[in-house]
């Protein structure tokens, strides 16, 4: 097993559901504007998955 695979194996969370193409997801992103912080929500449909593992 190479270094990248061993590091990825340690950090993959197993408690998350499988994401499939066509699923609708909501993503919450913390945005910092000057001294203020807010959480911006995005919602969309998965249209493509690329690679695999932790880098997916």
Image: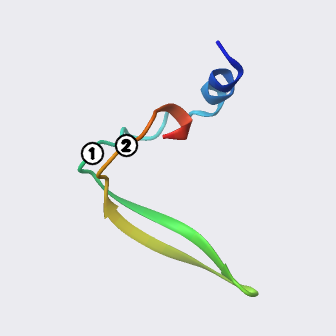
At a point 62% along the width and 29% down the height, the residue shown is 8
Q: Which residue is mark 1?
A: 21
Q: Is residue 15 visible?
A: yes
Against 50, residue 10 (above or below) is: above
Left or right of residue 41, residue 6 in this image: right
Provide residue 47's location: percent of width, then percent of height.
29, 52
Q: Secondary structure at mark 2?
A: loop
Q: How many marks?
A: 2
Marks 2 and 1 in Cβ contact (< 8 Å): yes
At a point 27% along the width and 51% down the height, the residue shown is 23
Distance from Cα at disc 2 to Cα at disc 1? 7 Å
Q: Secondary structure at mark 1?
A: loop
Against 50, residue 32 (above or below) is: below
Are there few (<14), some (14-19), or many (20+) residues within 10 Å of tag 2?
A: few
Left or right of residue 51, residue 18 in this image: left
Q: In the displayed image of the protein, which residue is found farthest to the right?
A: 35
At a point 67% along the width and 26% down the height, the residue shown is 4
Mark number, residue 49 = 2
Q: Quadrant of the N terminus?
A: top right
Tell me where residue 21 sits by quadrant.
Answer: top left
């Amino acid at each position: 097993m190479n270094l990248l695979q061993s590091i990825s194996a340690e950090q993959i969370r197993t408690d998350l559901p499988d994401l499939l193409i066509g699923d609708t997801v909501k993503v919450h992103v913390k945005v910092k504007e000057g001294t203020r912080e807010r959480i911006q929500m995005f919602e969309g449909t998965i249209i493509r998955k690329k690679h695999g593992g932790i880098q997916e």
